[in-house]
Amino acid sequence: MAMSLTSEARMIKGVGPQRAELLAERGIYTVGDLLGYLPFRYEDRVQFSQVKDIQPNGTYTIRARVIGGQAIRNRRFRRDAIYHLLVEDEAGGLLSCKFFHGGYLEGRLKAGQLLILHGKAEVDRLRPARLEMINPQIELLEREETDSTEMGRIVPIYEAIGTIGSKQIRRAMYAAVQLIDPRMPDVLPENLRARLGYPARGEALRHTHFPEPTESLDRLNTFRSPAQQRLIFEEFFLYQLSLGLDRHATRKENAIAFRVREDRVREALKRILPFKPTEAQKRVLAEIVADLEKPAPMNRLLQGDVGSGKTMVAFEAAVIAIENGTQAALMAPTEILAVQHFLSARRTLGKAGYRAELLISGLKPAEKQASLGRIRTGEAQLVIGTHTLIEENVAFARLGFLAIDEQHRFGVLQRKRLMDKAASHGPRPHVLVLTATPIPRTLSLTLYGDLDVSVLDELPPGRTPIVTRVTSERHLPGVWEALRREVAAGHQAYIVYPVIEESKLELKAAIEEYERLSKEAFPTLKLGLLHGRLASEEKDEVMQRFHRNEVQILVTTTVVEVGVDVPNATVMVIEHAERFGLAQLHQLRGRIGRGAEKSQCILVAPFRMTEEARARLDTMVRTSNGFEIAEADLELRGPGEFFGTRQSGELGFHIANPLRDKHLLELARKEALALVEEGTQRRELQRVLGMLPGEWQRRYHLAKVG
């Protein structure tokens, strides 16, 4: 039977049933799926570098033989080994390599073995006259490798899939590439491809996997070759097309056009405001009001830095919905944040006579049933909860407005499920998505391309800047003394730890440190302990005591990252700060500086840390601007980690990188929206939709759009 792109991947020579199972875990079932697994790097194996020519801080690919190797173990941690390797190139040049956590190489590398080394050359600290490679990537070769996929060409390097290494993937890919038909159907419209000068899909795949020897290695490794650029554009185009269709379909649906400019609504808004709104809040509310007055559902993203007043804007929109005879809902990612919003709503809206309802899984059965009843009858005017709002047994009387806090912690489909729940018995609700993670415009087009964007770029008056500094563990006695002085002045503090209990990571843990600090550092003060494993009632009790200043120092984990608002807290100490991401550190720091008193954030980290960790902490000391921090976070981590599971799990990008490929994202968005605006019944659009992979069809419900 002749093989084709639809043949099962296990049919490729060298794959077989066992490797096919590993490929399937990555969503690779067919030959065509395999072709979508693209190289992340390329090596020039036409002309290798020689040891005598390498320079400090340069990156090189070297072919060499193993002279010898030895694993040296730490006396304290026997499993942790540094593997020292000595190799010799064809010209007799010797190069030493060092592999941290390299015990796995012991016995694997033997004298005389031929291998490829790829890495950065660095000055050997013990012998400054010599260079070494730290943790280079290695690939073992057979005695005299002559395979055309391995030598004499620009070689693609793939990320391993389980036990399937780059070499095995490369050989399977070489067989798959031979099955590409130059006339294979192309998902990009022909006139669009011609206008942008892009190669056909089959040609782009062939040249991305196995480039011509004349192709620039620099262009390939920066993903700027014509073949790669075409595939990047394609991924962005299909994603933006799905968002455009979603947006188009939503705007055709019905929503309640709220009456906002009546005197009773204006007076209601004035009654709930605890302070004079900032100009940014006024501007954003005007944008929201313009949407709420339309008979099409609002879909708006509200970005605002920590403490900029996003929740108050959401409450104002909720009051507009309530005054128009509908219910409002606010969905938060954690129970602690939901409770904080509920308490805030009760303080702010309760005095104006509005009924707020809390719905979380931690409620007792009788309380939950009573709550569900009030939601069903409409007695509950503002419902605040976690993902429990999506559960089958939750029925709203008439949901007119929905706010979703920290949207990046929910999936796109969770947002849709709540909207669909409301639309099943009436018009769709207006939706406001809140995020305290500032996102540059290009990336907001990727994460939230189906939403209009508003930005709160001004903090309420009276906030004092937070002083941030880095210190080491040996200076902790001085830090604890500073905390005692703050508490003596009537203020409160947080001490944050990365883990709840002791672990093999040699990190301080919240529970153990709470016990130690209570006895040794602060025996006369009132300490509280808060972490994610506590029952809802216990978390609520601890937070209430902290609000009332019955707890002076709160020992906690990142469970306080968002939503906790105690203006009297003026100090935050974060131990093992090098272990936290920038966005997390910024969110944690945002728990202080919420009053008029001077606040300080102390980051405790070891003297020796990675360059990336030091860059994160330096950024925290340098700025408190959330947008600057988000940009730095993206530069350090890249969009894949910035988005977390959304990047691989929901966005489905294999080669596209929104940070690196901004211009292509903008171009793809423009072209995709133009195709949508030309009419969903057009034959070309239907052809493109028909060619989309099944995962895209299922993910965005595109099969029913049009």
Image (spheres, grey):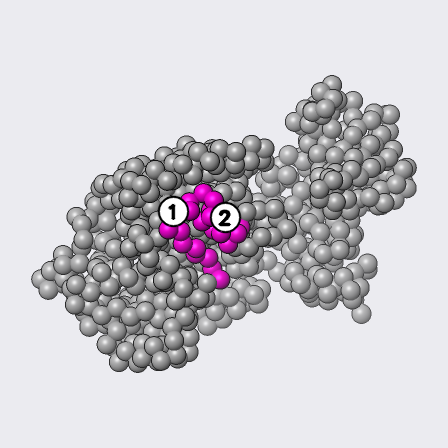
656 sits to left or right of 88: left
Going from the N terminus, do you reach mark 1 or mark 2 first? 2
The magenta segment is 509-533
Question: Residue 436: which disc?
Answer: none
In this picture, is 175 found above or below 92? below
Residue 690's place in the image compared with 460, above or below, is below
Taking the magenta stretch, the answer to whether it contains residue 521 is: yes
Quarter occupied by the C terminus: bottom left
At a point 19% along the width and 72% down the height, the residue shown is 325
Viewer-side residue, 205 vs 650: 650
Depth check: 565 or 143 in front?
565
**Residue tagged by mark 2?**
516
Which quarter of the picture shows residue 389? Answer: bottom left
Residue 319: where, in percent of width, then height?
A: 21, 64
Nearest to the eye among marks 1 and 2: give it.
Answer: 1
Position in image of residue 317 (x %, y %): 24, 60
Name the residue located 29 percent from the left edge and 70 percent from the top edge: 357
Q: Where is residue 216 in the image (x, y as percent from the top left)?
A: 66, 35
Q: What residue type is labelled 1?
A: Thr
Task: Sort mark 1 into few (<14), some (14-19) or many (20+) by Cα contacts within 10 Å.
Answer: few
Quadrant, the N terminus: bottom right
Q: Name the residue under label 1.
A: 524
**Horizontally, is 583 left or right of 370 in the view?**
right
Looking at the image, residue 696 lies above or below residue 621? below
Residue at screen point 24% across, 63% down = 346
Of residue 289 and residue 673, the one placed in the foreground of this image is: 289
Q: Position of residue 90 (x, y in %)?
A: 86, 29
Distance between the alpha carbons at the discs numbered 1 and 2: 13 Å
